[in-house]
Amino acid sequence: MITVVVSDDYKHQPLICHKTTSTRKLKIKTMTAHAIIRSLKKVSCITPILAASAIGLGAIAPEAQATSLVPQQEGEVNVGLGTCLGSGCSYLTLDSIIQSVESLEDSSTGTKSRLFVDQAGTDNTYGGIQFLSTDIGTSDGSGDFWFRPVAMDQHGTTPLVENGQLEVGTFEFTFSQVLGDLTVNWFDTERSGGTSYTAFDAQGDTIATGTIAAGSNGNVQETTLTNVKSIILNLGERKGRTGDGVNFQLDSTVAVPEPGLMMGLGAFALAGGFGLRKRQGDRPTA
Ligand SMILES: [Ca+2]
Ligand SMILES: [Ca+2]
Ligand SMILES: [Ca+2]
């Protein structure tokens, strides 16, 4: 099995002419080499050069796996609100794919939230914020680490309600490269219209917007987008004293081709574009 990955170097040329919309979920799928070739033949908008490149990538690239962009330990994430909460604290180290995270004013609280990484089953204290081992609301029992917003009374200073048990916030994630695919998992969205996203390309143009549907208690919903440079996530909604808290995870199939691999791709591109006949010596060795 081989996975097609849209390389950062090809972001200026669409691999497949998907039109990203607010309601359509796009996924990079794991395919066999023959399936890739069949699919490419069907897509009229792919140039011969790019088609050759994609086939070359499929033929010689190792299988790419989705990688979690959530730190695999509990702690606080630096979202631009000064020092972290708690004596002797330090912020978590993020994957280098994440260039920055900024807390924005949330539409339902009017303040900027803090952001943590949390795992159910352990209790945590961050200054005046307490996470219980089993939440008052809904705990995820998977053992996964989740980004967990905490709604604040003022910008980043005081817990809003429930000692930090209201997972509401708005955050902008900017990535250090355009991500060929980005998957957002949303945990426990129960109120319609309170959780949404806006994704941007490298030029800052909006490429996708969407609202997460209400679901049953503890539900996990998944959104996959392509060619994302930054994304604004509006998590949960304050309604009355509490509201609808929503945690989230980010995954991406990040694949940065090796220099040798890129040379191989170049050879494929030239062969495809100019119709050169294959010769034994042209075959990549990777
Ligand atoms: Ca915990
Ligand atoms: Ca719930
Ligand atoms: Ca909820």
Image (tube, helix red, strand yellow):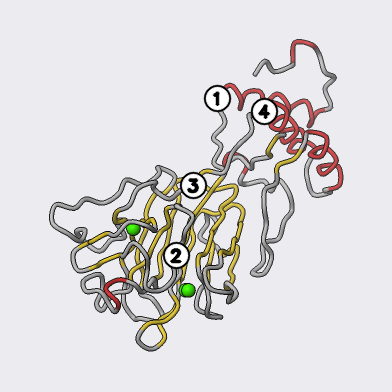
Amino acid type, label 4: Leu
Q: Is residue 63 above or below residue 93?
A: above
Please tell me which residue lies in front, 235 or 205.
235
> Tag 4 or tag 1, which sits nearer the N-term?
1
Residue 197, percent from left and from top: 52, 68
Label 4 Cα neighbours within 10 Å, binned few <14 / some 14-19 / many ≥20: many
Which residue was labeled with disc 1? 259
Could you give the CA–CA distance between mark 3 and mark 2, rounded to whole angstroms?
A: 14 Å
Which residue was labeled with disc 2? 247
Residue 186, percent from left and from top: 52, 64
Could you give the CA–CA distance between mark 1 and mark 4, rounded to whole angstroms?
A: 10 Å
> Tag 4 or tag 2, which sits nearer the N-term?
2
Residue 276, percent from left and from top: 82, 22
Could you give the CA–CA distance between mark 3 and mark 4, rounded to whole angstroms?
A: 27 Å
> Tag 3 or tag 1, which sits nearer the N-term?
3
Which residue was labeled with disc 4? 265
Residue 68, numbered label: 3
Mark 1 beta carbon near ligand 1 (under 8 Å)? no
Secondary structure type for disc 2: strand
Residue 255, percent from left and from top: 56, 37
> Tag 4 or tag 3, which sits nearer the N-term?
3
> Tag 2 or tag 1, which sits nearer the N-term?
2
263 sits to left or right of 200? right
| Rendering quarter of residue 199 | bottom right
Q: Which residue shows up at 70% across the image and 34% down it?
A: 2
Secondary structure type for disc 3: strand
Most extreme residue toward the left, as rendered? 87
